[in-house]
Image: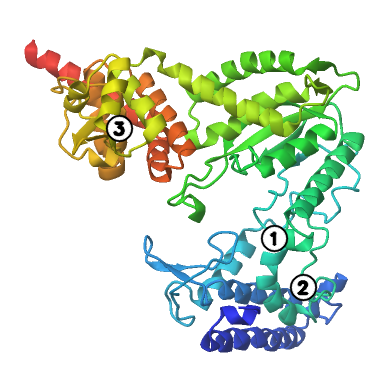
Amino acid sequence: MTEFADLFTNRQLTVLTTLAETVATVRQQVVDDALNAGMPLGAPLDDGGDGAQAYADAIAVYLALAVSRQTDRSSSINSWDSGCNKIRNVFSRQAIPMTWDYAEANPFSTKSGNFLGQVEWVAEAVENVPAKPLSEAHQADAATRDYTDVVVSTDPPYYDNIGYSDLSDYFYVWLRPMLADVLPSVTATMMTPKAQELVANPYRHGGKDGAARFFTDGFNQVFAHIRQTARTDVPMTVYYAYKQKDNETGTSTGWYALLDGLIKAGWEITATWPVRSELSNRMLSKGTNALASSIVLACRPRPDDAETITARIFNNLLRSELAQRLRTIIASEISPVDLSQAAIGPGISVYSRYAHIRQPDGTDMSVQEALQLINQIIDEVMGEEGTGYDADTRFAVKWYEAYGWSHQDSGIADQLARTNGTSVAQLESGGILSTGGGDAWLRQPTAMTEAWDPATDVHTSLFEVAMRLTGILERDGAEAAENAIAKVIGKGIALDVVRMLVFRMFHEAEKRDDGACAQQFNALVSIWSELASRATQKAQNHETMQGVLVG
């Protein structure tokens, strides 16, 4: 595929081009009807007119938008959404996906993907738009515009996540022919402008290194300019939802570019917190550990006389401040998938308050090195949470860290069990370890399918409870998990310790690229407070009923 036309079948192209050509016909009909009704012709909409011509131009714009929406549902890239039994649009995520077998809708039907539905969608949007705007939008260069008396709250580009201008061309090639005579000032270019777009696009900048330099330099320039002209009595807030994940160089380039741009421009990150800003049912979140939150960074200009400290002092400060903040974040209702990103804030706030952090060799510690240290401390804090585990749970966590769910020699299991004060036989009877053929392996949550009642379970470890609940939620749903938690409460097991164990298992699963189990662990912790609240009520009701029966 080399042209946009290649994304459509001949039948789809015929329908779409016919609809597009009809927009001009309808526009002229609206002009004629308006003139017959006594409305003056007036100037075009693009020149600020408000007569018959401008009215017809506005109708043409709305119809063109409906046609462009139809292209998103009438392409050979469309797939079938089996969950909702309807056509899935091309841009269910911000990219044109590879589709091996496409689904096609009837644009003249009353079902999903029909054209009248697009027209009605646009009409409904227009109906709900305020007649008098509550805000103003200006197109300007972020690196040169004036920020005097402006409160800056920005959601900057996400490094190489989305190339908006390239994606816009999918719609622009349809909109431009329809609106060239209607909005000539907007449709003057053959394609959407791309040269100044702040995105790390390798093919525009001679490869990955050139793209990284372009993006980082652009960030530095924008944030430096904001610092020079923005208000100092209120902080600048920056929203970011690019998933922080280590790559082969040790840290995420997206986070590195954002933080490097802020700090080099003279900003100090004074406060951070994750906020829930992403829909849980969006395409990216289905089947993946997509972020449920954005991280909000509050930034103020770093004092010109900020101190320079040694890397050793920074290390001590970071371990002291970050460890405490991490425990607070983990105790909140944050999803495990958001922890790594949320931890960046309090860690980098320590880094950003100093002018320089000197390494023993005299060089300055980079943002990238600080991020690596932050990730190391996250590992240490998660490890500290295991000090109160029972022997079986200590064994299971250490086994998973080393071997995951893989089969290993039984001798290894026996040695690790002895080291942790348990035995292979006890681990088997506890339902968390299986053996056979000279091998031993941990049982995955979804493999624990046999009936389980904590009240009658003779040997119950924290690990078994965590894995059982994870498997029950994945297999049988929230209500079944809630009922199981109620029985766990009745056995006197501390729920907060179980939650923390599942949190840690997610962290370890992410490190092992065990995506399926990481997703299951994240799902349980994400709704833990709701499950625990209802389960506690059920457990209390059961106790009350038991008391009545006994009495």
Residue that badge 3 annotates: 467
Q: What is the CA distance from the residue labelled 2 to the residue labelled 3?
A: 53 Å
The spot of residue 271 in percent (x, y) is 69, 25
Q: Could you tell which of marks 1 and 2 lies nearer the N-terminus?
A: 1
Rendered view: 2 above or below 522: below
* Amino acid under disc 3: Met
How many numbered discs? 3
In-image side of 283 versus 237 (left or right): left
Mark in front: 1 vs 3: 3
- Quadrant for the C terminus in the image: top left
Q: In which quarter of the image is residue 273?
A: top right
* Amino acid under disc 2: Met
Residue displayed at 56% across by 22% down: 326
Residue that badge 1 annotates: 164
In this view, the residue in front, 464 or 91, is 464
Mark 2 is surrounded, within 10 Å at the Cα level, by few (under 14), some (14 to 19) or many (20 or more) other residues, namely some
Residue that badge 2 annotates: 191
Label 2: which secondary element: loop
Q: Could you tell which of marks 1 and 3 lies nearer the N-terminus?
A: 1
Q: Could you tell which of marks 2 and 3 lies nearer the N-terminus?
A: 2
Q: What is the CA distance from the residue labelled 1 to the residue labelled 3?
A: 42 Å
In this view, the residue farthest toward the left is 550
In-image side of 371 versus 48 (left or right): left
The spot of residue 51 in percent (x, y) is 81, 76
